[in-house]
Amino acid sequence: MNIALIGFMGSGKTTIGKKLARQLGWTFLDSDILVQEKKKCTIPEIFAKNGEAYFRECERSVLIEVAKLKKVVLATGGGLPIGEKNWEILHRDFFTIYLKANFNELFLRINGDPIRPMLQKYPSQEQLKELYLNRLSWYEKAHVIIDTTQKKLERIIGEIIERASPICTNQN
Ligand code: S3P
């Protein structure tokens, strides 16, 4: 079993994932970094050269590879849990944790970030909010939902470890 952190851009998947993995003594992986290493290109370059659909294929093949491992905390890209095909893998091989935060807080964190091509695709706050709202039902399929709003990192990690303890202690 592995842990996958899911949620919208800016929800803290990478920061929380790194710290969580360290505390559990597990390996930390990040789907965006794995895609970039595999393709030897940055995410904005992949979007610009090959388009979003191609990026989604790369993301999926990385997910399939990580699913074969054990004791991994995977920080997923914000669009990875969108669609049944990826959820089949997520539900089978990962304990999934949705890091929930309200849109306004997320928007403040990600607004103007040049390394996030979805901000170019959805350039206004309203468009991005629509994307967020459309994705919620996919994120809410997670085994556990942790509300991160106004919480310190330590508290979020503590809540995750408490909720995930059956899978963290029962490894083989
Ligand atoms: C995306 C989120 C990004 C990255 C890509 C697409 C999305 O990851 O995978 O730019 O569709 O929400 P983060 O959620 O880590 O920013």
Image: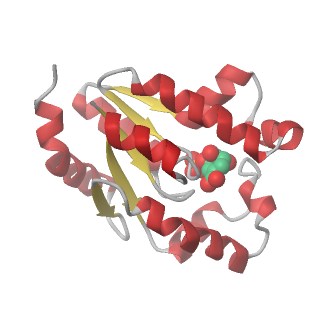
* Residue 139 locus on image (x, y percent): 44, 60
Residue under the image location 19 percent in, 45 percent down: 164
Q: Is residue 41 above or below residue 5?
A: above
Residue farthest to the bottom, as pictured: 126
Residue under the image location 11 percent in, 30 percent down: 170
Q: Is residue 122 above or below residue 13?
A: below
Please say whether residue 94 is visible from this viewpoint: no
Query: In the rendered image, which quarter contains the N terminus?
Result: top left
Instruction: Give the total of numbered labels.
Output: 0
Q: Is residue 1 above or below residue 80?
A: above
Query: In the rendered image, which quarter contains the C terminus?
Result: top left
Give the camera-side residue of 134 and 157: 134
Q: Is residue 37 left or right of residue 139?
A: right
* Residue 105 locus on image (x, y percent): 52, 72
Q: Is residue 15 above or below residue 58?
A: below
Please say whether residue 12 is visible from this viewpoint: yes
* Residue 25 locus on image (x, y percent): 25, 25
Residue under the image location 31 percent in, 39 percent down: 20
Res 33 quadrant in image: top right
* Residue 11 locus on image (x, y percent): 48, 58
Give the camera-side residue of 46 and 63: 63
Residue under the image location 27 percent in, 49 percent down: 157
Res 36 quadrant in image: top right
Q: Is residue 26 left or right of residue 171?
A: right
